Image (tube, rainbow, N blue to C red):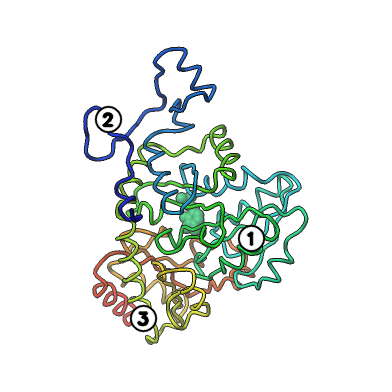
Amino acid sequence: MKETTKAIRIQTDRSQHNEHSTPLFLTSSFTFDDAGQGQALFNNEIEGNIYSRYSNPSVQEFIDKVCMYERMEAGFATASGMAAVFAGFAGHLQSGDHLVASNALFGSAHQIITQILPKWGIEYTYLESDAPEEEWDAAVKPNTKMVYLETPSNPGLALVDLEMVGRVAKKHDLIYYVDNCFATPVIQKPGDFGANLIVHSATKFMDGQGRVLGGVICGTEEIMEPIVFFCRHTGPAMSPFNAWVLSKSLETLNLRVDKHCENALKLAQSLEGLDGIKTVNYPFLDSHPQVALAKKQMNSGGALVTFDLEGGFERIVRFTQLLKIPSKTSNLGDSRTTITNPNTTTHSKVAQELKDKLGITEGLMRVSVGLEDIDDLIADFKQAIEGSK
Ligand SMILES: *Cc1c(COP(=O)(O)O)cnc(C)c1O
């Protein structure tokens, strides 16, 4: 069966009530038939649910769908994307280990790597997203245990060559850990390029409607084992309610992502060359410096478009006042188009030097293109650009 069918049909067993929609197991614990069965469950002699910090059928249904999409063997779902990102590090890295990562990362991932992991004696080396293979290779030290990256990156939409990093990870026998949130498994499957650990903020496109927080990490059975152990005992578990919402959302992931991408490409094309816009950045535009790589590892350009508006911050304020349809919010991956100025919001705490490297200019606007009618969106952007001159 195709993944679109599986995303709709993977389901927890029906209960005795024969409900049609997938059931929600909003319960903290599960009962034992008798003390003997309780003992067997705790001894791992039989499989079953004990307590929702460990496992829950609604949460498992969501995990099963994500593993199906990413072609991975096992997973764990968490209360937020960051809990999942952190679990991947915490499950594997120990004092004295070294991590190699691309420097174009989600803000909180950057904080974990530079502020939290060093407290436990875990060191890191950052590379530019477009660093060549020799640099990735040279960054690996005898104590390197893992490579970590995000592609496309937020908000620069810089790409990392997944296949090339896969070669480096394989050569040095490293855990190859990828945040695939921006692309979603509909657009890109890092596992095809050797990644053996993949993380998502389910808050974004997986929910797709801006309702719940969630995260999920999946990988090979062997790599997930210490991560599952870490999660079970430290407690970042996803709420069954959120898992139920997210599992329902995955039924429409392909449809939504296809439409997001179609709209985003049209918006990017219509903004390019407009008076008042310096540059438009979108992986599938011919002007994107890595368009060849984008077309190699992604099957469409994604939902995020950025552009650089001339005229300073006052123009940006006027522009956002005139813009009628998009929500001005830092979230992304929503059916509603959202827009933000990364320099003064999501990335305001990033050091100026790194901002310059990542292309976070004063005028940069990040748009997460939604599912509204594209002609309405284009007309709205044009009038706001024109009117804010
Ligand atoms: C939002 C996001 C995260 C963090 O997810 P939360 O659900 O907000 O904790 C991690 N990585 C990327 C790329 C994101 O966009």
Looking at the rendered structure, the secondary structure element under dot 3 is: helix
Q: Nearer the viewer, residue 190 or 147?
A: 190
C-alpha distance separating marks 2 and 1: 45 Å
Q: Position of residue 253 (x, y in %)?
A: 33, 56
**Could you tell which of marks 2 and 1 lies nearer the N-terminus?**
2
Q: Which dot marks residue 216?
A: none
When asked about the image quadrant of residue 52, the answer is top left
Vertical relation: 286 (above or below) 98: below
C-alpha distance separating marks 2 and 3: 50 Å
**Could you tell which of marks 3 and 1 lies nearer the N-terminus?**
1
The three-letter amino acid code for the residue at tag 1 is: Ala
| Residue that numbered label 1 is attached to | 101
C-alpha distance separating marks 3 and 1: 32 Å
The three-letter amino acid code for the residue at tag 2 is: Ser
**Could you tell which of marks 2 and 3 lies nearer the N-terminus?**
2
Q: How crowded is mark 3: few (under 14 residues within 10 Å), some or many (20 or more)?
A: some
Q: Nearer the viewer, residue 298 or 353?
A: 298
- The answer to whether residue 103 is left or right of residue 198 is right
Q: Position of residue 170 (x, y in %)?
A: 65, 59
Please give the name of the residue rendered at 35% of the width and 71% of the height, measured from the top-left corner: 264
Looking at the rendered structure, the secondary structure element under dot 1 is: strand
Q: Position of residue 352 (x, y in %)?
A: 62, 69
Q: Which of 73 and 55 is in front in this view?
A: 73
Please give the name of the residue rendered at 47% of the width and 75% of the height, measured from the top-left corner: 363
> Disc 2 vs disc 3: which is toward the camera?
2
Vertical relation: 343 (above or below) 197: below
| Residue that numbered label 2 is attached to | 15
The three-letter amino acid code for the residue at tag 3 is: Gln
| Residue that numbered label 3 is attached to | 269
When asked about the image quadrant of residue 269, the answer is bottom left
Vertical relation: 165 (above or below) 115: below
- The answer to whether residue 287 is left or right of residue 141 is left
